[in-house]
Amino acid sequence: MAYVVTVQHHPGKSDLRESLREAHRRHLASAGDALIGAGAVLDEDGEITGGMIILDEADRDAAEAFDRRDPYAEAGLIRSREITRWRLRWSFGEFRADGFDH
């Protein structure tokens, strides 16, 4: 089942985030096909304030464990985290009432 992991970063930590960006990307890539999507959360000025990851994991605990292993989390960049179960129904203009299998 899919989970959306939304995190907010501590303000004033852009240098830390930049120093860990490649390690963060390698961590995301390590999820393989379980990673449905990921990207930065931006404020209205286009500044990064956090991130969002959509994962196909066995359960919420697995999604949380994956996120906690992220170099951003391990370095203390994460201020808050929300994990929500999610179902994909619309994708690139196509609707499926039962959702998409990932």
Image (spheres, helix red, strand yellow):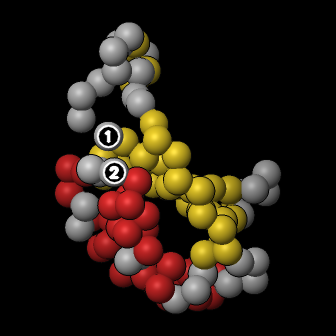
**Would residue 73 appear left or right of 15 to someone viewing this image?**
left
User: Which residue occupies 23% across, 67% down?
Assistant: 30
The location of residue 16, given as percent across then percent down, is 58, 88
Q: CA distance from mark 2 to mark 1?
A: 7 Å
Q: Quadrant of the C terminus?
A: top left
User: Which residue occupies 75% across, 83% down?
Assistant: 12
Element at badge 2? loop
**Would residue 63 appear left or right of 34 to someone viewing this image?**
right
Element at badge 1? loop
Determine contact: label 2, label 1, CB under 8 Å.
Answer: yes
In this orientation, does residue 24 appear?
no
In this orientation, does residue 59 appear?
yes
User: Which residue occupies 52% across, 53% down?
Assistant: 83
For label 1, count other residues whose C-alpha is less than 10 Å away and answer few (under 14), some (14-19) or many (20+).
some
The location of residue 94, given as percent across then percent down, is 38, 14
Which of 1 and 7 lies nearest the eye of the viewer?
1
**Would residue 42 appear left or right of 102 to someone viewing this image?**
right
Q: Earlier in the sequence, mark 2 or mark 1?
A: 1
What amino acid is at disc 2?
Asp
The image quarter containing residue 78 is bottom right
Q: Label 2: which residue?
A: 59
Q: Label 1: which residue?
A: 1
The image quarter containing residue 40 is bottom right
